[in-house]
Amino acid sequence: MKKIIAIYLSLFCVLAHAVSPFNLFIGSNYIADSTVQGFDNQNKCTLVQNFFNDNDEMLAKIAAGANGYNAIVATSYAVEQLAKMGKIIPLDKTKLPNLKNIDPKFLNQSFDPNNKYSIPYAYNPVFLAYNQSKMKELNIPINSWAAVFEPKYLKKMSGHVTVFDSSRNVIAAALLYLGKDPNSTNRDDLKAARALIEAASPYWVKYDSDSYYRGLMRGDVWISMAYSIDIYKTLQDMKASKMPINIGSSLQKEGNMIEFDNLVIPVFSNNIDLSYKFLNYSLDAKSAYDLSMMTGSSVANIPALAKLPESVKSIDWIYPRDMSKIHVFKMYDPKTRIYVNEMWAEIKMNGACSI
């Protein structure tokens, strides 16, 4: 009997001290472990990360009825789309005192005037990462998008090139290379981008937003469209394991996109107060500093930036020196979104790449 009573008392203690989950919808490797642990300890909860690979995938899941999240990290155009869908709440800024830490130039963006629905989280440039030895040997111009779009270069690298599995990123890069607005909705511009992609894609080995960096590490992939957070971590891992391949990275002279990511609170959050606490915690200087140092994310947090070492701040593909050639994704109108989705499906279906 005493043993049974002891078991019941143990179960009671476990239940009494059980912590509530805080569900965050976010890309992978996009938050510092110290931030997760600190938030858990401060609020007696368990932060659970729920991952998505692409903002269009996230939007599709939310539109289809996915819920249960307390906060979402959404890029520029996705914030605007979620607001139009009525899936996120207007923010009470009085509950976000740490918003004062954000550089004003990153506030009041066109996708969310006056930051009605969102606060800046981080931004990540999209550029080319490459095998330095191969690029030098083959004389490939890594400072231009020509490296992944021009057949005269691609013929030298056939089967060793990857681009993202993302219509927005690939089409934007094509438009930049053509000297056009990377957010263009003009049908002639989009057709020109499609022609460029279709001419290049037979030389690409796959569309890959998730594991391309492993190919770079192994030497299978010689050049790839890349995220700063992936390459930052890859270089750290390669240095630690003393791998022989030298990976380089470069922004492109035609310009680059950044995924300007933001935190929003969904209407279906079951704990709005805790959601605000997480947003404010993310705006803290230490959280932003740890995010940049641990993941290579670019942050807009002034006190965090002041503490970052030059070894990080001086990396151009994390903190671009010339922001005039850096572009933020804008939301497509419904007709353009449908047109681009159909175009992208046809590009991938028509034998572009060999996976």
Image (cartoon, rainbow, N blue to C red):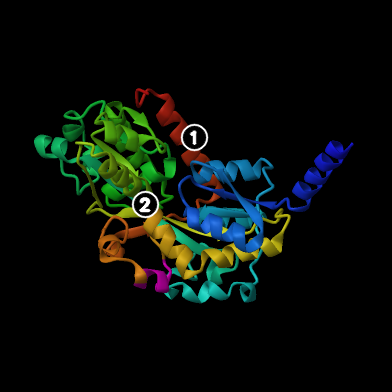
Q: Name the residue under label 1.
A: 342
The residues colored magenta run 300-306
Identified at 19% across, 41% down, the residue is: 246
Identified at 31% across, 64% down, the residue is: 323
- Can residue 243 be seen in this snapshot? yes
Identified at 40% across, 69% down, the residue is: 304
Determine the secondary structure under disc 2. loop
Identified at 53% across, 73% down, the residue is: 99
From the top left corner, tell me how far across and down residue 68 is, in percent: 69, 47
Q: Among all residues in the image, which is located at the extreme right? A: 1
Q: Mark 2 points at which residue?
A: 182
Q: Label 1 is placed on what type of residue? A: Glu
Q: Among all residues in the image, which is located at the extreme front? A: 2
From the top left corner, tell me how far across and down residue 348 is, in percent: 42, 29
> Where's the N terminus, which quadrant?
top right
- Which picture quadrant has residue 42? bottom right
In the image, which disc is placed on residue 124? none
User: Looking at this view, is 204 or 66 the one in front?
Assistant: 66
From the top left corner, tell me how far across and down residue 27 is, in percent: 49, 46
